Image: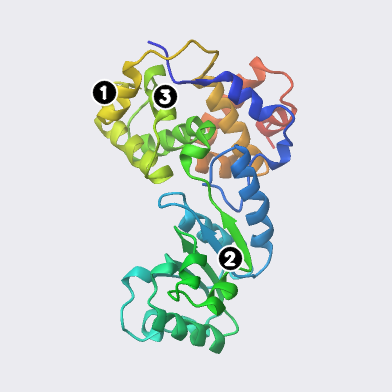
Amino acid sequence: MNVTTVDEQRARGSDSGRDRSRSWPGPAFPYIVGESERMQNVYAVITKAAEGDANVCLKGETGTGKELIAEGLHDAGPRRHRPFVALDCAAVRDLPMERHLGDHGRDGFTLFLNEIGDLAPHLQARLLEVIGMSADVRVIAATSRDLRPAIHGGRFREELYYRITVVHVELAALRERKEDVPLLVAHFLRRKAAAHRKTIRGLSSRAIEGLVANPWPGNVQQLEQWIERAVVLAEADLIDVEQFPSVIRETTATPLPSMPRLRLREVEKRYVLETLEQTGWNRAKAARLLGISVRGLQYKLQRYLGEDKSIVSARSAIEPG
């Protein structure tokens, strides 16, 4: 049985003509994975936004990683040593806004407003007052829908909209960047296997083809849950379609046309090298992000050098010093 494969033409296409320095968002966002053009556009905005203190609005479907990016913006920004306060706007009722914020209003904190479109109009007015009273607060808002129709319908305050959308970031649904699915699979597979103390070699070709073809209504969050479920249910070191919901088995029941393939080992190699670039070739940091030991990372680098002598940076990374 073939181990995890992806469409080689797409994978190579993501490398051709692409500025390798922009492949990943950098160490500020270590858990955001993807090389598609849609993600490159996101990286270009959030890396700039992380350098400053402007309010940011993240728009994307449920499960696209809005809170993960919000936390990354906070951790990489000038308020990284101050509180990060997350507020679920759908759960806020008639309690005074100050009760939800507690004592953080005096700390120069970052306020993350999840699903801000669900905040009741009278609480929107109070939120504007609270933000106005504390000049030392950064607002990062998230919404799964366009707020402009709500403004026109009188359900969302226009003034609040312009306060929170100084920087606007549009997050693509996973079905719109399917070329990122194999990289996400490798990322989640490594993390979940380590968390559940299981040795997983990879996925079958049928499984990866089914995952790439799936429409993913729950986006990256759904993919992560499915990979964890597969890891938990796996009885061997190779995960096949039987460990996934029936929709994946149904997708793979129809033979797919023959296409060039990229082996899991090559996908892993790209992922490891990208993580090293992201951490400035710091082996300890890279090993932590990859969920492996430093010795295991050095072994992989030595193997990669044997396969590709052009990896100049890897040579310096494995030399003792």
Mark 1 or 2, closer to the camera: 2
Instruction: Look at the image and name its color scheme.
Output: rainbow
> Which quadrant does the C terminus fall into?
top right
Check disc 2 and report the residue beneath it: 56
* Sequence-first tag of 1 and 2: 2
Q: Is residue 66 left or right of residue 255?
A: right
Label 2 residue SS: strand
Towards the viewer: 226 or 281? 226
> Is residue 19 among what the camera can see?
yes
Amino acid type assigned to the residue bearing label 3 in the image: Ile
Which quadrant of the structure image shows residue 139? bottom right
Give the residue displayed 56% in from the left and 32% down from the top. Answer: 271
- Neighbours of disc 3 within 10 Å: few (<14), some (14-19), many (20+): many
Decide if residue 245 is on the left or right side of residue 180. left
**Foreground residue, 228 or 191?**
228
Closer to the chain start, of discs 2 and 3, is 2
Label 3, label 1: how far apart the Cα atoms are: 12 Å
Earlier in the chain: of badge 3 and badge 1, it is 3
Residue type at the position of mark 1: Glu
- In the rendering, which numbered label is found on residue 242? 1
| x, y percent for residue 14 | 64, 30
Residue 126 occupies quadrant: bottom left
